[in-house]
Image (tube, rainbow, N blue to C red):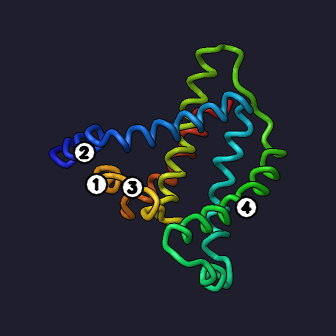
Amino acid sequence: MDALQEITQSVLSASSDAVVIGGMFAVATAYGLFFGKGRIVSLILALYPTALIFELIPYFKDILGTVSGTSSDVLVKAVIFVIILLPLHFVISHFIFTDFSFSRIRKTFEAGILGLSALVLLIAFSYRVIDISELYNFSSGVDTLFASANFFWWLLAPFVALTFLRK
């Protein structure tokens, strides 16, 4: 219980983390509201194969060898990740046929849950796949939450949300 209170205190005390996480959440939720439920679901589903393909790119070290500086490495990795993500997102979105309900409250709630799911995946992948610590270093509370021991559960959480929002 003390560990949970310590995590909560460090997350809430780190205002810059709250702004970054809140901004990412707002962007993901706005994406869902603006483009629809099918697009945000396809984005969430496209993140999984993108991370796998990104990890298995042959000669990736040779590509990064031409870039000097650590922050440039992170930016190159992020650009390559997005280049892989966009076509997969486009292809998967053609197979997802779902939309939000007509109720404004339910639509906002579902977009928030799906935005939170996308946010969780992006933060989890930022720790394991791209390692953005050179650009932005989260506080120790967020580091503890997204540690490698919990990585599996963070990957499973969006599927739980998709299960409950499947209609």
Q: Which mark is residue 140?
A: 1
What is the crowding at mark 3: few (fewer than 14 residues within 10 Å), some, or many (at least 20)?
A: many
Residue mark closest to the camera, 3 vs 4: 4
Query: Mark 2, residues whose alpha carbon is within 10 Å: few (<14), some, or many (≥20)?
Result: some
Left or right of 135 in this view: 5: left
**Does label 3 or label 1 sit earlier along the sequence?**
1
How far apart marks 1 and 2 lie (CA) works out to 7 Å
* Rendered residue at 57%/34% (across/down): 164
Image side of residue 118 versus residue 39, left or right: left
Indicate the quadrant containing the C terminus: top left, top right, bottom left or bottom right: top right
Query: Which of disc 2 and disc 3 is earlier in sequence?
Result: 2
Tag 4: amino acid: Ile
Q: Which mark is residue 10?
A: 2
Judge by depth and name the residue closer to the eye, 19 or 107. Answer: 19
Amino acid type shown at disc 1: Ser
Q: CA distance from mark 3 to mark 4?
A: 25 Å
Asked whether the viewer can see residue 55, the reply is yes
Q: Could you tell me if the residues under marks 1 and 2 are in contact, i.e. CB atoms within 8 Å?
A: yes
User: Of 61 and 104, which appears nearest the observer?
Assistant: 61
Q: Which residue is disc 3 drawn over?
A: 146
Going from N to C along the chain, the mark reached first, 1 or 4, is: 4
**Amino acid tagged 2:** Ser
Asked if the residue at tag 4 contacts the one at tag 1, i.e. Cβ–Cβ closer than 8 Å, the answer is no
